[in-house]
Amino acid sequence: MSLVLQHVSKTYNPRSAHPVRAVRDLDLDVPDGDIIALLGSSGCGKTSTLRMVAGFEDVSEGTITLAGKRIDRLAPARRGVAMAFEGYALYPPLNVEENIGFGLAREGGLRRGTDTRKRVHEVADLLEIGPILDRRPAGLSGGQQQRASLARALARDADLHLLDEPMGQLEPQLRAVLRGRVKALIKARGLTAVLVTHDQTEANAMADRIAVMEGGVLQQYGPPGELRDRPVNLFVATFLGEPPMNALPATVQPGGLRLEDGEGVHLDVPPSALPPVGSKVVFGVRPHRITLGQGRLHATVTSNQWLGDQAHVAMELGDRLIVAVAHQRVAAAVGSRLDFDFREADAHVFDAESGRALLHGNQPA
Amino acid sequence: MSLTIRNLHVAFRRNLVLDDVSLDVAPGETLVLFGPSGVGKTVLLRAIAGVEPAARGQVLIDGRDVSALGPDRRDLGMAFQNFALYPHLAARENIASPLRARGVASAEIEARVGRVAELLRISHVLDHPPRALSNGQKQRTALARALVGQPRVLLLDDPLRNVDAKLRYEMRLELPRLLRAAEAATIYVTQDYREAMALGDRIAVLHRAAIAQCDIPEAVYDAPVSVNVARLFGDPPLNLLPCRPVAEAGGLRVEAAGLRLLLPAAREAAGRDCLLGLRPETITVSRAAGGGAGTVRPAGAGGAGVPVEIVAATPLHERMVLLLRAAGGVELLASVLGEPPQGVPVVLQADEQRALLFDAESGARIPHVARTLEVVA
């Protein structure tokens, strides 16, 4: 069901000399059937937001609406929210099967042949914990506990599923497969899910939309492609993407930019949205959008690293490094000169002081 | 300034942590010591440093046996994942500490600290105590301290572990230049396969107390000696499909997940239980033939396309990871460039040249006879 946060704030110790404003004036609209990710580093406000939606924290200001109904004053159990925690929170005396079926018990219990039992076993198989259903949580590895917790949340019919770092403990092969299976399950059942994570690869893999938070403030909320191609500020631009966006200081000139790279490389940029000549800006281009081997620009290769499925080439442009990613091996020795280029449409310009985006490609931000 | 380790054994009571490990690191070379946590990487570093009492074997620096020497007489530089800076000393004095211990003249110390600080871009924070430094600056300070004495051997124990992703990436680009300039024999420990491939001139993979493979990064990735080594590299990691190959003219016929591949592999594996290893980026997904325009037949793709269902698409950086389900419910991961075909029947194809075959019982890779990497002189 759709979830709407309006002007939500969370302030800890509001009356003390040092109140902590963990979440500030957050507006968030999660459409029915979407998977969204709250993404940010520790302390960004994502976990406080999750706890307010779940009901483990009061909202300091604002309202939370789920399926058209105000829930921010309701007890957690009455909100219609299923959760998988980072700390697992499995019931120690119950085995894995009973833990997963706990929220479903009133729908007929786990006796043989019931729909509840069938669903528990389906979710358990999907998460590859079928063989450990009769075990108690205490005897399980971190990854197994995490999957049991996730299974318990996914087995439930709820208006909203909150998943807090649900796969951080899993080994890589399993994680890659489970991301796909869980995403397919959520979509097939039409669930609405909020995923909380600090891992951008997890957010990108799973989410229809990503909300990037920093310092308690929502920076940008949109589909992954929009965040990649039209980041609202330098923080979002360099936070997302691996390797991160190249960001080079530059000065506005008539007809374009001059990079402050020691060589004074001039770049033609349509001046439509640029500040006055002489203004300081930051020029950005994503490593994947740089083409190597020919072009208007030249630089000295400082490293050329092949990672099995992609090459990362770093070049010294004046006293700055610029990184390019290619999907084939690049024949360029360290110390050699390499030509490179990028399309105008892939260039970004940011205000140097505020970090606000000014230009994406040929369009004003 | 080479480092040689001969027949190193470390056992804690009955637990054999390192079993007859031998390694050579050339001057100016970076050897990455790679493996999951708990495999003994740090123990090996401790043995080289001379602080592991349980170590048996020889450590030679520039051909000289230093096994009997204390750690301070081995001419080592070290940095660790927890930085291990002196909390009461400013960055400058932390960096200077190995030189002070050796009684180097003050003017000389100042000059060398200044140079290494510039190299690591921390000149502006030299007067700050560790608590006033960011994690990135702490880590650069620790590296500066390791480098300042121009040691013959550098031991770097996962130094980027505790810095954020952006800084880690920056250092991954910068370190090769720093390490080349240091001209030391460097051993670099990491659990991150990308870091290992980016920084290592060679990678030594530790598995079950021994070096399973020691080779250039491309060889470890493309021609792993065993299924255990293969699984440690790649994101997402490789698909492993049980199969039983049949000898045929031109190599081995392998059937798994509906694929029929003819691998140029050694024929003695015929009839044995094997695992077919397919790296996700060597699998292509395209419209099924007869699906109209847009049918793709990539060069090098082996066999006819196998009909599959795309269960889910999960983007990974600029790639798309596809969870595929073939007949019989077999799941595979493919990592493709661009958007996959939607709403039409699709088939997968696998690159025979890059397919790996492992003996299911021993885990050893069954070598291809025609792979360019393995042409025997």
Image: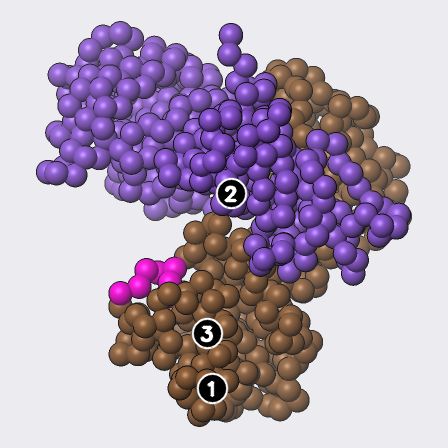
Chain colours: A brown, B purple
Q: Is residue A350 above or below residue A215?
A: above
| Mark 1: secondary structure | loop
What residue sits right under mark 1 in the picture?
Answer: A114
What range is drawn magenta here?
A: A139-145
Question: Amino acid type of disc 3?
Answer: His
Return the x and y of residue A249 as percentages of the image width and height.
68, 37
> At 52% across and 59% down in the image, what residue appears?
A178
Which of these two is toward me, A277 or A100? A100
Q: Is residue A92 above or below residue B343?
A: below
Magenta stretch, overall SS: helix
What residue sits right under mark 3 in the picture?
Answer: A121
Total marks shown come to 3
Q: Quadrant of residue B361?
A: top left
Whole-number angstrom distance, CA of label 1 to CA of label 3: 11 Å
Q: Is residue A68 visible?
A: yes
Question: Amino acid type of disc 2?
Answer: Cys
> At 12% across and 29% down in the image, what residue appears?
B53
Q: Chain of mark 3?
A: A
Q: Residues within 10 Å of mark 2 (few under 14, many from 20)?
A: many
> At 39% across and 12% down in the image, what residue appears?
B27
Q: Are marks 1 and 3 in contact (CB under 8 Å)?
A: no
Whole-number angstrom distance, CA of label 2 to CA of label 1: 38 Å
Quarter of the image where the C terminus of chain A is located: bottom right
What residue sits right under mark 2 in the picture?
Answer: B243
Q: Chain of mark 1?
A: A
